[in-house]
Amino acid sequence: MSTASRPRLRAAVLCALVTLVTACSPGGEPTPRREASATSAAPSSRPPGPDERVEVVMAGLDRRARAAQLFVTGVPLADLASGDSVAQSGVGGLFLAGRSVAPAAELAATAERWQSLSPGPRLWVAVDQEGGAVQSLTGPGFERLPSALDQAALPPAELTALAGDMGTALRDAGINLDLAPVADVVPPGTEAANEPIGAHDRHYGSTPESAATAVATVVDGLAQAGVTATLKHFPGLGRVRDNTDTTAGVTDPTTTADDAQVTLFADLARSPAHPFVMVSSATYPQIDPAAQAAFSPVVVTDLLRKRLRFDGVVISDDLGSARAVRDVPPGERAVRFLAAGGTLVLTVEPAIVPEMIDAVLARSEADPSFAATVDDAVRTALLAKERAGLLATDVSR
């Protein structure tokens, strides 16, 4: 959906809610509802659609509660009890950070407790569960997963079964968002020098063509179990040398907007499974030399949203403790990411979330255009929750 069409949609949605609270004036603005007369037309029996349900939920959230929905906040797997206060804060989701051998049943009970504590829509409960070197959960209920490169080498039927089992295990543990699979492409012969991806066999292939089918299979397998996938790390970390988690100034001097690996993300993101897209914190001078991808309107809005036509959730790579963003004040990280066109701010560090939300609210008060951008991001975030069945707000849900 284009940005220009959203005001018209919002007016139409408000009109569609006439039987609930308002009537619409000829200009599309809501006016107080009058008592219906005996000759009034009968209200429509059509159930509200997803966009209308999102608007109803948004109307029940104040400005701070709306902004909080745009944050996925880290909870250490070694200290799950600390997640209770995070869940109560009204954030959009919790990210299980680190490694754990806890049983799936124990994690499920913890996740459901968090859901009951959330004052708003149900939470995203996220984890890094790729396989190989990046598998956060290995306790009872979780099978050891091969690396992405080894997954891609499996016969199609075996990979389909593996992806389905992976999704089922996560769902049974109360997890509904996997920050996987990696869609980065590492050119052949460069794997060892590509510290974040290739050196750990996190990629599914050395060309977009060889990676596409395997990545799509994992996305579909997760979705069939009710788990949303995340394609990472747009526009690609397959050609960098250093890891943005531990190194500042990571740059990909080669990738262009027309690159086949960039197009691969778009092709995969248009899946009916509605995967998220995670944007990297590296810089891509051939696309935008002026800003890191996560803070770049050229990368997120112009390339991913407009040119590649992705209108779903764009989630950041870690904006909490990653070395790549440490020189930017925390509040400014959140503001820059949302201004660039992002949707969900991921931060491993929970202590900085209040500062980030304060900065978003302050910028919204000073800049009506940014405030509208934030509201659009909230709509995108809530629509994804609607698709995932997470919009309920009562504790009996």
Image (cartoon, rainbow, N blue to C red):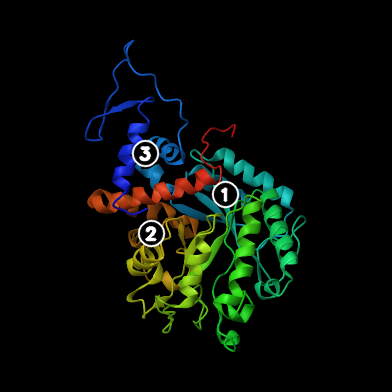
- Residue 182 point in image, percent of width and height: 57, 69
Does 39 sit left or right of 112 as displayed?
A: left
Q: Nearer the viewer, mark 1 or mark 3?
A: 3
Residue 298 x, y percent position in the rendering: 33, 69
The reply to whether discs 1 and 2 touch (Cβ–Cβ < 8 Å) is no
Note whether 292 is above or below 272 in the view shown.
below
The Cα atoms of the two marked residues, 1 and 3, are separated by 23 Å
Task: Identify the mark at residue 37; answer none if there is no mark.
Answer: none
Q: First in sequence: mark 2 or mark 3?
A: 3
Please identify the quarter of the rendering in which residue 180 is found.
Answer: bottom right
Q: Earlier in the sequence, mark 1 or mark 3?
A: 3
- Residue at 49% x, 64% y is 278
Q: Which residue is mark 1?
A: 83
Residue under numbered circle 3: 62
Three-letter residue code for mark 2: Ala
Residue 190 at x, y percent in the picture: 57, 87
108 versus 192 height, above or below: above
Q: In the structure shown, which secondary structural element does the residue marked by tag 2 occupy?
A: helix
Q: Quadrant of residue 122?
A: top right
